[in-house]
């Protein structure tokens, strides 16, 4: 993969926040409007979002640090194309982390964390997602919270990054119209954690991750170039007054990016 460049060392996944450029690109990917291999022109994006090229460059650099965008010197930024092997590697790493997270969460289970876990599942079950990216946001939040219950901040950081990268894989490569079964799988996993059933919770999580991976279609070809401005117009991105907003180092409250 080409080397990513320019992202601030402080620009962790937690810094994705609610920046309109970042959120607009993520939404366009989740709706299958931006596909792997498509070029993201700085001038076009600056015009679409009513900002300047410095802001766009910062946003693309940050997305590059998350492997969503590939930055190629003298050519520009492109929606990343992940190979089947890369996707499998991400899911293999997820399985290792999820086992550790579940084990630690059960070892450290308290009345307060049990209550939080029940509330998280209930919120996901009752929430009406407005688009696919919002659904992925909720799903990632469930997994990150389990890691948080384990009490290991390093584990939480790695889970945040892998949960986001998994969400991006799903958004890019899940067939259009595929049914999301995450809200159905999470209650069973939570129930086993609350029962302190490590083997059962890990087994349920393994099944959940296997089903997620099986839904991905990684052998499709990239779409032909299209009108970037039209894509964002169609999904409701409205041009805003120019503002040199900075992405790096400004954390915000997006669940998926915690």
Image: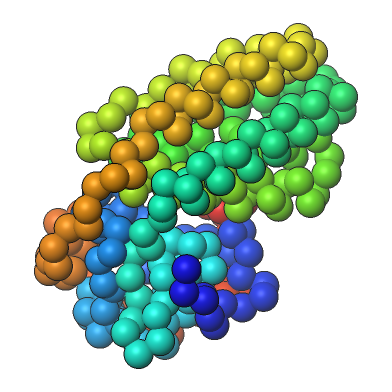
Seen at 33% across and 70% down, the residue is: 78
Occupied quadrant, residue 222? bottom left
Expressed as whole percent of the image width and height from the top left, the position of residue 121 reads 57, 23
Q: Is residue 255 visible?
A: no
Extreme-front residue of the structure = 85
Seen at 80% across and 26% down, the residue is: 103
Q: How is the image coloured?
A: rainbow
Expressed as whole percent of the image width and height from the top left, the position of residue 173 reads 33, 44
Expressed as whole percent of the image width and height from the top left, the position of residue 23 reads 39, 59
Seen at 47% across and 68% down, the residue is: 1
Q: How many marks?
A: 0
Occupied quadrant, residue 140? top right
Left or right of 168 on screen, residue 114: right
* Viewer-proximal residue among 228 and 95: 95
Left or right of 74 on screen, residue 115: right
* Viewer-proximal residue among 74 and 19: 74
Seen at 56% across and 53% down, the residue is: 257
Name above or below for residue 193 compared with residue 27. above
Name above or below for residue 236 compared with residue 106. below
Name above or below for residue 16 compared with residue 132. below
Q: Is residue 168 visible?
A: yes
* Viewer-proximal residue among 4 and 256: 4
Left or right of 164 on screen, residue 149: right
Expressed as whole percent of the image width and height from the top left, the position of residue 153 reads 80, 49
């Amino acid at each position: 993969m080409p080397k990513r460049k320019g992202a601030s060392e402080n620009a962790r996944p937690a810094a994705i926040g609610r920046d309109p450029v970042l959120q607009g690109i993520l939404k366009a990917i989740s709706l299958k409007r931006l596909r792997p291999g498509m070029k993201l022109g700085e001038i076009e994006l600056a015009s679409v979002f009513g900002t300047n090229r410095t802001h766009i460059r910062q946003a693309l650099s940050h997305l590059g640090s998350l492997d969503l965008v590939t930055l190629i010197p003298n050519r520009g930024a492109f929606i990343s194309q992940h190979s089947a092997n890369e996707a499998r590697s991400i899911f293999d790493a997820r399985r290792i982390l999820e086992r550790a997270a579940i084990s630690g969460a059960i070892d450290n289970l308290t009345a307060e964390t049990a209550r939080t876990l029940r509330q998280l599942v209930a919120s996901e079950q009752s929430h009406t997602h407005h688009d696919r990216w919002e659904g992925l946001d909720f799903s990632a939040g469930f997994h990150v919270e389990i890691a948080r219950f384990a009490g290991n901040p390093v584990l939480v950081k790695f889970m945040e990054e892998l949960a986001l990268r998994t969400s991006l894989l799903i958004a890019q490569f899940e067939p259009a119209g595929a049914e999301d079964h995450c809200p159905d799988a999470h209650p069973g996993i939570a129930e086993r954690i609350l029962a302190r059933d490590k083997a059962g919770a890990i087994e349920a999580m393994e099944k959940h991750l296997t089903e997620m991976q099986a839904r991905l279609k990684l052998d499709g070809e990239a779409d032909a170039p299209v009108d970037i401005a039209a894509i964002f117009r169609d999904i409701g991105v409205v041009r805003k007054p120019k503002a040199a907003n900075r992405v790096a180092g400004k954390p915000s409250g997006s669940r998926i990016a915690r």
